[in-house]
């Protein structure tokens, strides 16, 4: 990237400093390249990011880059909102997590995990099958309703993968939670750090980076463990893209090169979000041992499955039709 970063400004949007370690990522980038970051609307949604590209087109404060969910990445490309660019580490980004022409690419992903209050739960569950143990009566909760919360929806899908379902069939996951509910193991309480601390929801099915992030919050208060079920590893990711109308295109490309370098990817991992190039970096042994020690075992992450937009739509429709009747 030598000689390309003429502008000393980068306009980002929707990057909360405490999410996936974006605070340290932005600080490191500025320190390394001398490029000042203007981070607008840190808590904006993917839909609002695309709207900013449309409405601020031609203005110096328009976003140079966005970080959006896959469906919005596809939409942005279709609308002509993105400029194609292939980073130098392009080949090590999994094919199912990037646009073949370089209009967008996944940056980090999360998988469904079990967050466990081991001060209350004697044995930490390692698989979905373990959750059927009668010892877990009244202890298992999702992060919200799968009809409205993405993490809970993903939890049902991960359970489906472990119980004969597939990315084309979420039904076994719905049936699994119906079984857990009948046994009394699953309780329809929206899990939060507060419900964990009071012992109301000792086992929480949620994204790994959220469960792992609670480790600091619970330190000294309870024995908090996180495990990724080996028998159903479902993941979801976010995508980076450069605006077709970027006021600082060279800075935008420099940002992408940094994020997708080993250094940038390790900073995501430091924030408990698995970078898109995780398996490649694991193979090359470039992930520090002390960083890996803070994470669940890496083996399940090599089995992660991601759904397409068509599969997501179908699963949502199935859930809508069956969840209330089967689980309540």
Image (cartoon, grey):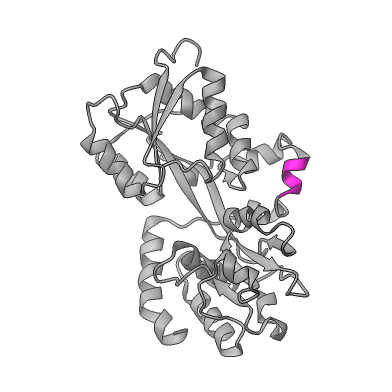
Is residue 53 in view from this perspective? yes
Based on the picture, tell me whether residue 292 belongs to the magenta stretch: yes
Q: Is residue 3 above or below residue 195?
A: above
Numbered marks: total: 0
- Tell me which residue sits at (53%, 42%) in the image: 94
In the image, is 284 to the left or to the right of 107? right
- Of residues 79 and 249, the one nearer the viewer is 249
Q: Is residue 17 above or below residue 306?
A: above
| Residue found farthest to the bottom | 182
Percent across and percent down for residue 75 are 30, 46
Q: In which quadrant is the C terminus drawn?
A: bottom left
- Tell me which residue sits at (57%, 41%) in the image: 21
- Of residues 17 and 269, the one nearer the viewer is 17
Percent across and percent down for residue 180 are 58, 83
Per the picture, the main secondary structure of the magenta-coloured stretch is helix
State which quadrant residue 309 falls in: bottom left
Is residue 80 in view from this perspective? no
In the image, is 51 to the left or to the right of 221? left
Percent across and percent down for residue 299 are 71, 53
Based on the picture, tell me whether residue 307 belongs to the magenta stretch: no
- Of residues 297 and 46, the one nearer the viewer is 46
* Span colored in magenta: 290-294
- Tell me which residue sits at (45%, 28%) in the image: 86
- Tell me which residue sits at (53%, 26%) in the image: 29
In the image, is 54 to the left or to the right of 1? left
Percent across and percent down for residue 202 are 65, 73
| Residue found farthest to the top | 3
State which quadrant residue 322 falls in: bottom left
- Of residues 18 and 244, the one nearer the viewer is 18
């Amino acid at each position: 990237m030598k000689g390309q970063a003429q502008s000393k400004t980068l306009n980002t949007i929707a990057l909360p400093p405490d999410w996936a370690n974006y605070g340290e990522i932005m600080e490191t980038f500025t320190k390394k390249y001398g490029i000042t970051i203007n981070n607008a609307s840190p808590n904006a949604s993917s839909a609002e990011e695309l709207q900013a590209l449309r409405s601020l087109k031609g203005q110096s404060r328009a976003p140079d880059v966005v970080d959006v969910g896959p469906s919005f990445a596809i939409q942005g490309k279709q609308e002509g909102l993105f400029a194609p660019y292939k980073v130098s580490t392009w080949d090590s980004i999994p094919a199912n997590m990037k646009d073949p022409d370089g209009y967008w690419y996944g940056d980090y992903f999360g998988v469904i995990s079990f967050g466990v209050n081991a001060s209350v739960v004697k044995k930490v569950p390692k698989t979905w099958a373990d959750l059927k143990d009668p010892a877990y009566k009244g202890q298992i909760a999702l992060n919200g309703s799968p009809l409205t919360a993405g993490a809970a929806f993903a939890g049902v899908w991960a359970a489906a993968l472990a119980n004969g379902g597939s990315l084309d069939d979420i039904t076994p996951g719905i049936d699994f939670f119906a079984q857990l509910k009948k046994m009394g193991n699953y309780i329809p309480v929206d899990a939060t750090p507060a419900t964990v601390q009071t012992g109301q929801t000792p086992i929480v099915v949620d994204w790994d980076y959220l469960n792992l992030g609670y480790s600091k919050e619970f330190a000294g208060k309870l024995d908090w463990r996180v495990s990724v079920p080996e028998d159903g590893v479902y993941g979801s990711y976010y995508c980076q893209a450069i605006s077709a109308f970027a006021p600082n295109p060279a800075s935008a490309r420099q940002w992408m090169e940094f994020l997708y370098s080993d250094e940038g990817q390790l900073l995501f991992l430091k924030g408990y979000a698995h970078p898109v190039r995780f398996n490649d970096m694991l193979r090359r042994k470039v992930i520090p041992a002390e960083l890996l020690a803070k994470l669940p075992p890496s083996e399940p992450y090599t089995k992660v499955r991601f759904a397409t937009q068509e599969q997501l739509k179908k699963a949502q429709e199935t859930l809508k039709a069956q969840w209330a009747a089967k689980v309540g």
